Image (cartoon, rainbow, N blue to C red):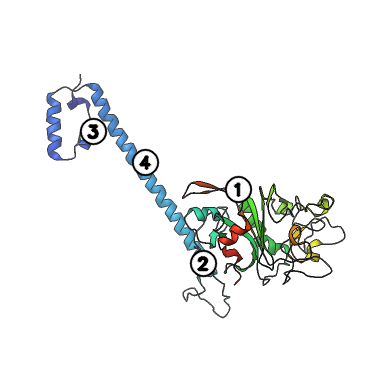
Amino acid sequence: MSSICSDVPLRSIFLKFPLAWEKKLIMKQACKNPVPADWVFHMQMLDKDACLLDNNKLRQRLNQLQDLLYLYELQLKDILENTYHRTNSRLFSGNRSTQHEMLLPTTSGNLIVYDQDCSAVYNQKKTKSGYYRIRPRADREPFLAYCDMSDGGGWTVIQRRSNGRENFNRTWDDYKLGFGRFQGKNDEYWLGNDHIYDLLSRGERSLKIDLMDWHGETRYAVYENFQLANEQDNYRLWFGTYSGNAGDALSGGSNFEHQWSASHRGMQFTTFDKDHDRFLAGNCASENKGGWWFNRCHAVNLNGRYYRRGRYKGSHDDGMVWSTWHGMWYSLKYSAMKIRAPFFIDSESGDAISTSVMRTSEYKEQGNEELDFT
């Protein structure tokens, strides 16, 4: 047996009884009656646990404040270094005679959101299609991309053709960094091979390609395990299993004899100023008016010349082509290439959404925004 007057620190007792009269009462009773040593040890441990809990809470709060400070620093850097914040501001106007106005997205996308991709944007309950700033790698600057929140949500659009206003017969550096307009829901652009590579390096991704002809008919193709090498390997293309109703044109079509020269699997990216195709007699990008993963030369070229009304003639089959649907001499009206994890998890519902896509009739019934050309 032990006396609490001599063995228990006063601080242990006072912490448990904050009021003065309670302190006096407990100390008076404790000094009259011996207290078991195990009770003393228990009180000391409770005091230690309380201190540890307080320390952990303080550390958590400190980490939260540090994260918030870092976010504010990034936002301030973004405001000071980028021109899109200045277009309507006199504070940053500077020399307005030499300032070029940049078109701003009019959708609901938040320009100061640094989610890793559009799936992360969707999981933040931002479920309206639009332009968002994403950042797949923390060591690189964020960039704008269109997030398609239809068809299950969370799709990052890496290419879109819809009106022929954008020139896709561009240099290697243009395709590397990206080009186009990032304002309207049907604006044409190429996201940039570096950005696409960063998005794909985060894990397995599926590619979905939406197509429309000049009669308003739609098709789609889905490729599992869509991969891109880095610039050192000239953004070499790899992809896995096909599904859909547009035909497996990326694999070279159904004609086995033609696949060895038309399949795009394993092909490097080619532009008119950097030739990496297998066509020894020329440059496929020069002939077909756009950068692509050419073989000798192609069964697919969604970056080709934009011919209106579908059927076209010329010295080369240089249209916007998906050969397994309308053949090589029909130029499509619309295409969108978009990527997402093969089993996208909707964080709100907890449901896994497969990349398998709806039938065309279901696609139209839902009034998909991407196919609205009005």
Q: Quadrant of the C terminus?
A: bottom right
At label 3, the amino acid type is Ser
Q: Are marks 3 and 2 in contact (CB under 8 Å)?
A: no
Which residue appears at 61% of the width and 65% of the height? 371
Q: Position of residue 255 (x, y in %)?
A: 81, 52
Location of residue 181 in the rendering, given as x and y in whole percent from the top left corner: 61, 69
Q: Locate residue 247 relative to residue 9 in the image: left or right.
A: right
Mark 2 residue element = loop
Of badges 3 and 1, the one in the foreground is 1
**Depicted 190 relative to depicted 263: above or below:** below
Element assignment for label 4: helix
Left or right, 66 with reference to 331? left
Whether pointer 2 and pointer 1 mark residues with C-beta atoms closer than 8 Å, the reply is no
Which three-letter amino acid code belongs to the residue tagged 4?
Answer: Asn
Q: Residues within 10 Å of mark 4 (few under 14, many from 20)?
A: few
Which of pointers 2 and 4 indicates the residue nearer the eye?
A: 2
Mark found first going from the N terminus, 2 or 1: 2
Looking at marks 3 and 2 on the same chain, the residue that comes earlier in the sequence is marked by 3
Name the residue tied to disc 1.
342
Q: Nearer the viewer, mark 2 or mark 1?
A: 1
Q: CA distance from mark 4 to mark 3?
A: 20 Å
Disc 2/disc 4 C-alpha distance (Å): 42 Å
Q: CA distance from mark 1 to mark 4?
A: 38 Å
Query: Which of the two labelled residues, at mark 1 and mark 4, occupies the earlier sequence position?
Result: 4
Label placed on residue 56? 4
Separation of disc 3 and disc 1 at Cα? 57 Å
Q: Which residue is mark 3?
A: 12
Of marks 1 and 4, the one in the foreground: 1
Identify which residue is drawn at 85% across, 62% down. 282
